[in-house]
Amino acid sequence: MMAIPFQPPDRSRDVPVWRQIEQQVLQQIRSGQLRGGVRLPSALELARQFNVNRHTVRRALDALEERGVIHGDPARGLRVREECYDYPIGRRTSFSRNMHNLNVSSGNKVLGTALVTPPQRVAESLALARGEGAWWIESSAYAEGRVLDHGQAWFPARRFPRLDEVFQRTGSVSRTLAEFGITDYFRSYTRVTARLAGPATAGVLDQSPELPVLEVESLNVDGNNQPVQYGLTCFAAERVQLVLSTSER
């Protein structure tokens, strides 16, 4: 929670006190002093800062919720609403392409890589033989300074030797696969589940463990329908809106 220097309302003005409070908070949001995702002080704390009663503060906060600039509930408190990006998921899905189309600066951070014997579900999805290895890559993706997702991906190791080094250098699945001769690939399936973030994912996403994430399980295949990537990605639900597309592009 940020400490914001609010000023007591001017009772000599011909503007209701609650409206003055609403205007002050709104001005702080629009100026960037209260950024998206920041939790507001409680109604009691705001009442102390503004030297008014809680009912007056509550009316101002209700007006801000109606405007759609803050949101929340009594259990988690009120937060400044974050900008939510539309993230298309279709036959071809690429984080870098989606961010480029939104004209926002973005990138990836590699959190870990390893050559592993993958879980059974991953091995079956990638059509691996018993005991066959896969490259595991854990990463996070961000846009305009905000972390949007926490992802894990597995790739057949026999087909992609030293893939971990290539990904560390390129920071992109599409550019990595292109270096192995796969210039186009397709989404075989996508499954989306909503759940609470939990401590590990919340730490990466820099959000509360009690806030929701959209967990996306996916499989990408090449032009011969051979699996190239199994993914499990958690998107911050308050920052990303998944848009399912039926387009063949």
Image (cartoon, rainbow, N blue to C red):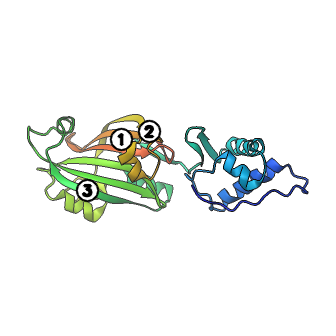
Query: Distance between the Cα atoms at labels 1 and 3?
Result: 28 Å
Query: Distance between the Cα atoms at labels 3 and 2?
Result: 31 Å
Mark 1 vs 2: CB contact within 8 A: yes
Amino acid at circle 1: Arg
- The residue sitting at 46% across, 62% down in the picture is 105
Number of residues whose C-alpha sits closer than 10 Å to that of mark 2, classed few (under 14), some (14–19) or many (20 or more):
few
In what quadrant of the picture does the C terminus appear?
A: top left
Q: Count all numbered tags in the image, as a single digit.
A: 3
Q: Nearer the viewer, residue 118 or 74?
A: 74
Residue tagged by mark 1?
91
Secondary-structure class at tag 3 = strand
Q: Residue 16 vs residue 155: left or right?
A: right
Secondary-structure class at tag 2 = loop
**In the rendered view, would you say 106 is above or below 94?**
below
Q: In which image quadrant can residue 187 be found? A: top left
Res 246 visible: no
- The residue sitting at 8% across, 37% down in the picture is 130
The first of marks 1 and 2 along the sequence is 1
Residue 112 tag number:
3
Residue 176 tag number:
none
**In the rendered view, would you say 100 is above or below 59?**
below
Foreground mark, 3 or 2, reads 3
Residue tagged by mark 2?
245
